[in-house]
Amino acid sequence: MPHNEEKKGVPPPVSPAEKAGGSGFPPLPPGVVPGHFIRRRSDRAVLGSLVVLAILGLLTLSYFAASVFITILSSILVALALEPPVLLLQNRARLGRNSSSVIVVFLAIGMLYGLLYLAYGSAYQLFSDLPLLIEQVRNAPLVQRITGQIHGLTETLQEAGRTIAPPAQALPGKEGAIILRDTTSWADAILRGLGSLTTILFSLSFIPFLVFFLLAEKEHLIRRTRNLFPGEHQETVSVTIVVIEKMLQKFITGNAVVAGILGVATTFVFLLVGLPYWIVLGIVCGVVSTIPYLGLVLALLPPLVVGLVTFDSGTPIIVIAAAVTALHVIAANLLIPKLVGKGVQLNPVASTVSIMFFGWMWGGMGLILGIPIVAVLKCVLENMEPTRKLGLWLGD
């Protein structure tokens, strides 16, 4: 009889322990076969482990191939910023997609070249005088007093540590060993991820071509991206791409306009005060002021350093600090809400962590690319049912 029941497909009887989920486990949900329940939990654990390993592998690849990722992501952001002019030429001038992309890319390169031409003299003079400026900053009385206090505090802490800790026994043959410590300069920290000057120039040479291909092949790329997913998910992919595109376009163009306004205003203030290298410092202050949370500190640092070694009185320095602070406050409270709006809609914790993490991994470019990357990740997570809660957690 049991043999016939098995042939007819009747499942064998389940013991009370199995119905209860095994010894020490809560009862299983009604209608769930014990073997299927265990197998489903095992599949989820394997899938979760694979996702974690894939994320760690991607982050490792992003760290070691930073210049490649920075070039690709920068090209995507530039292409999104240049998409509205391309559409304008297509609709008004009745030009094709390729012709409009070529014209817009060449106009963008021309504007960038003109800006670099205007700032070249001031930038060249700044980089030529940079070693002298650094030496003057080091020899400034205020800086020497601060460094002396820090050095004294460090010596006190080291002496206290030697008093508390037991004396270390010297290893044989190591009495005269010299310890070399690797130090990282501020320039290395800012340019981390871009590599040497040759790598920077090599990456910059690819950006115009990548931007053109992204603009010219946009429709084909979107269609091929949709075809990578099953049919029932293609509509979700299309909606996600549209949301990401609109969000990044508003974020990039709004911040570019704000950076331009702040750059012109700070350049004019530095010119009136008589600050050296006023063009370069004004442009730098305008660009870095758009970085969330850290923008004000990064914008104040270069002009104040140059002003400390240039001016004898403190009045110009106070004017510079007050002007940069006032412009940053106006931009944060009026210009950015008006031109950018809510933008990426990240909560302060997610924004701060993204700046910290990508700034550590890619240096200065990580400060710029960190928030757009996390914003795109938030949009993707919000439009997938299993990860929607995580996307909402990242949101504002």
Image (cartoon, rainbow, N blue to C red):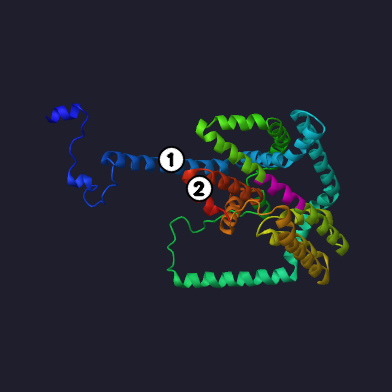
**Residue range corresponding to the magenta coloring:** 247-257
Q: Give the left or right position of residue 259, taking residue 222 as reference.
A: right
Residue 225, position as x, y percentages in the image? 58, 32
Residue 372, position as x, y percentages in the image? 63, 48
Q: Which mark is residue 209?
A: none
In this orientation, does residue 301 appear?
no
Front residue of this view, candidates 163 and 129:
129
Q: What residue appears at the point 69 percent right and 58 percent down from the top-left corner?
A: 295
In this orientation, does residue 263 appear?
yes
**Quarter of the picture holding the C terminus:** bottom right
Front residue of this view, candidates 222 and 104:
222
For label 1, the SS is helix
Front residue of this view, candidates 138 and 23:
23
Residue 356, position as x, y percentages in the image? 59, 55
Going by the numbered disc 2, the residue's amino acid type is Arg
Question: Badge 1: how crowded within 10 Å, few (<14), some, or many (20+)?
Answer: few
Distance from Cα at disc 1 to Cα at disc 2: 19 Å
Image quadrant in which you'd find residue 179: bottom right
Compared to residue 224, the image places residue 31 above or below, namely: below
Q: Nearer the viewer, mark 1 or mark 2?
A: 2
Q: What residue appears at the point 56 percent right and 55 percent down from the top-left corner?
A: 350
Reading the chain from its start, which is encountered first: label 1 or label 2? 1
Q: Looking at this view, name the residue that lies furthest to the left.
A: 1
**Quarter of the picture holding the N terminus:** top left
Front residue of this view, candidates 167 and 66:
66
Which residue is denoted by mark 1 in the rendering? 50
Q: Which mark is residue 388?
A: 2
Going by the numbered disc 1, the residue's amino acid type is Leu
Q: Give the left or right position of residue 74, taking residue 90 as reference.
A: left
Residue 117, position as x, y percentages in the image? 85, 45
Compared to residue 67, the image places residue 160 above or below, namely: below
Q: What residue appears at the point 58 percent right and 48 percent down from the top-left corner?
A: 374
